[in-house]
Amino acid sequence: MEYQIANRLRHVQGSIIRELFKLANDPDIIGFGGGNPSPETFPVDDIARIAAEVFACNPVSVLQYGLSEGYPALRETMKKHLLKTEGISFEDNELYIVSGGQQSADLVSKTLINEGDIIITEEPAFVGCLNTFRSYGAKLVGVPVKPDGMDIEKLEETLKSYPQAKLMYIISCFQNPTGFTTSAEKRKQIYELAQKYDVMIFEDNPYGEIRFSGEHVPPIKTLDADGRVIYTGSFSKVMAPAFRLGFMVFNKGLSERLTVAKQCADTHSNVLFQYICNEYMTKCDYAAHIASACEVYRKKADLMLGEMEKKFHPDVTFNRPEGGLFVMAFLPEGMDSFEFVQEGIRRGVACVPGVAFVVDQSKPSSGFRLNYSTPSDEQIVRGVDILGKLTYEWLDK
């Protein structure tokens, strides 16, 4: 039969990144295209022990339905953790556990966004959330992101041009795909503009704990005096992505509607893995685990960036991220990276073209995203060498 696809999905394209994951099964392809955390960082032994103990002593507690808002003990643990590490207060805020940070974008869209509403986003930005917004019929308007965050002048111009805008989407630390971090000053300016033009902010921070250099910058949420910032994070990068667990922090006035939105999505998140997360955070050395993971990523990032500095054409620019999993390189302005990336794949290295992360995917992008978290050291050296030679061929021809 001929299927009549809903309007909200007709113009949502599949993720180029997810398609590139299929190349991971090809042993001849060096994968710089994914976004997986390093398996070296998974606390496998502790996860196995905690799971074994609960199944031996109280299995029903993790096999029965749970609360839509999340496992109570983990919610309290996360509130204490975020107050201590990020300075987020819970006097007026609430915290829910969600099925991965990605679900926060879905619940926010379901709760706040009507078809045709304007969402202002960093550009480039994470394709998963952009596609979620698109699936609810939102109109996306991009604002260029610089190494220290959104272009503030262009952001205000955009807010003036779209006074009906509902939401701003910002990845505040080690942005996916660029690796950029919004400075403290720009966080303040962004919040003040949100107040001035009465716009909500969706602050996405799945990589925040993976800082391996530089100074900690408090979230925009810590500036929130009027309940306009929704803050989200993930356990995927610090525990294991298959847990499919994240959290969102929001003003208590949104609790009822977000509870309903969650119940309409999946009733509740995985109880077993919520239990494991809480046990690990409260009974193991979570701080040492994070420090160990950061050291793994620091070494990998230093290796890749060092090789890029030596082997990429000098007209190819890139920033040095202070954390996270990604760096984005840029061909000279006006060049399109899509064919460059295609040729890289033909030569055995997969990365992601910048067009995957922009609002208008019909327009060319000069950027290409590289991931350093999963390739081996040998693969990093060999892959950057291949791409480096390609940059010289591409730019000198």
Image: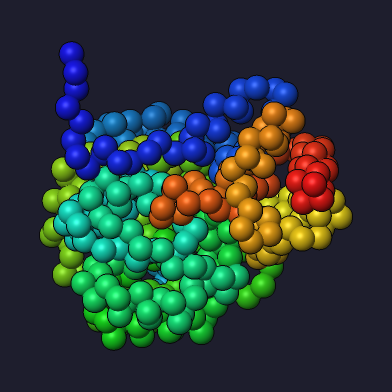
Q: Is residue 168 left or right of residue 146?
A: left
Which residue sits furthest top?
A: 1
Give the number of callouts. 0
Where, by quadrant of the figure, is residue 46 drawn?
A: top right
Q: Residue 383 location in percent, x, y?
A: 77, 39
Question: Can residue 82 be spotted in the picture?
Answer: yes
Indicate the colouring scheme. rainbow
Q: 380 or 292: nearer the eye?
A: 380
* Residue 382 location (% of width, % of height): 82, 38
Query: Is 1 positioned to the left or the right of 321 in the image?
Result: left
Left or right for 347, reference 352:
right
The residue positioned farthest toward the right in the image shown? 310
Q: Would you say residue 294 is visible in this rendering?
A: no
Q: Residue at x 23, y 39 (%)?
A: 266
* Residue at the (35%, 83%) spot, across then down: 193
Relative horizontal placement of residue 165, taking residue 85 as reference (left or right): left
Residue appearing at x 30%, y 80% in the figure: 160
| Location of residue 90 with respect to 269 vertically, above or below | below
User: Could you tell me which residue is drawn at 69 percent across and 67 percent down?
Assistant: 213
Quadrant housing residue 204: bottom left
The x, y position of residue 34, in whole percent, is 58, 40
Work out which quarter of the rendered image holds the N terminus and state it: top left
Quadrant of residue 347 within the rendered picture: top right
Of residues 208 and 81, the one nearer the viewer is 208
Which of these two is toward me, 95 or 369?
A: 369
Q: x%, y% of residue 103?
A: 32, 48
**Viewer-proximal residue among 319 and 123:** 123
